Image (spheres, grey):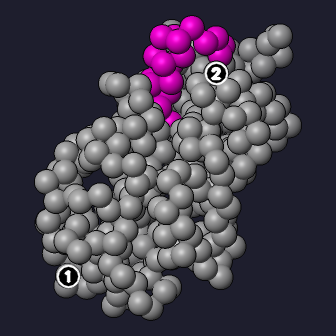
Amino acid sequence: MKITVIGTGAYSLGISLMLSKRENNQIMLWTESTDTFKEFKKTHQVKRIFNDITFPDNIEMTDNMEIALENSNLIFLITSVKYIKDVCLSMKKYYHNIPLCIASKGIDNKTLLPLSKIVEDILKTKKICVISGPTFAIDLINNDPVALAIAGNKKCIELVMKNLSNDTLKLRESTDMIGIELCGSIKNVFAIAAGILKGLGYGESTGAFLINESLHDMKKMIHALGGKKKTILSFAGVGDLLLTCTTPKSRNYSFGYLIGSNPSRDVWMDYLNNNTVEGYYTLNSLYKMLKKKGIDIPLVTLLHNIIEGKMEPQSLAHFLITKA
């Protein structure tokens, strides 16, 4: 079957390799970059992402959306959150109710809607599911045992599980699509906080303190925003939070580390200009969403104020001790 993967970032490429394990699958990557397309066509590599990986023959690439979606049986949407709306608008002309799996994580900054709602509204489809969990692209590529939570349309879930699960990737179904989406989004915000603490010089015990408090806040937000409290225990919840909050392999954590270790706001902004930090984008969306709905999560407000330069990074450790 033909499977289309929209996006050519590290995670898109990792998921594509997982899908390519089934020999009957033909994977079509879509990129907006003509240079990336030309490089792949010539070398079957994407050196800006993975310098030493040559992709198998059942993975192809195009920079033409019509070709990408033509005769496709399943779509994976894996682009930066801020581009989701524009990408869906580009897809709309060629999209015909094809089952679609969202692997991007975040909340739209303008509408304050989850990505599944953005996709549903633009593409006029209910055939949507989401995946989220503790998986770095490099770990997918190295064939380390990893796991993801999946939720959404039943037929879409069945199709994704059939084609994505394999000898190194486990999928566990959830009935809470809102909760899975929120977990995948919110954990990136708290990963920035974890990085800040590490950048300030605090040890693992303080990091664990933050993770524990973050879990309580995540559960409160999920419930207040329409999800189920128990979803915090899924791969998308505690699993992904632990992963993202404990390693510099996470760009969210690395961004936070820079904030904690370097007082120059110009340095922070330079990092944002050169790296995709979904937690930064999501923090702005989450802050506005919580304020609009009257939900009080002081840690989110504090992080927003730190990044906006209204409070010092050192205030984070003091907040943990004094928080009720």
Name the secondary structure under disc 2.
Answer: helix
Q: Nearer the viewer, residue 281 or 28?
A: 28
Neighbor class of circle 2 (other Cα within 10 Å; few <14, some 14-19, many 20+) is some
Can you give x and y, in whole percent of width and height, for residue 316 in the image? 69, 19
Q: Amino acid at mark 1?
A: Lys
Is 121 in the magenta? no
Residue at 28 percent of width and 72 percent of height: 72
Neighbor class of circle 1 (other Cα within 10 Å; few <14, some 14-19, many 20+) is some
Can you give x and y, in whole percent of width and height, for residue 249 in the image? 58, 55
Q: Amino acid at mark 2?
A: Ala
Which residue matches tag 1?
41
The span shown in magenta is: 277-298
Q: Where the C terminus falls, by quadrant?
A: top right
Q: Nearer the viewer, residue 234 or 146?
A: 234
Residue at 71 percent of width and 42 percent of height: 231
Residue 224 — which label?
2
Instruction: Indicate which label's residue lies in the foreground, 1 or 2.
Output: 2
Q: Does 180 appear above or below 70?
A: above
Name the secondary structure under disc 1.
Answer: helix
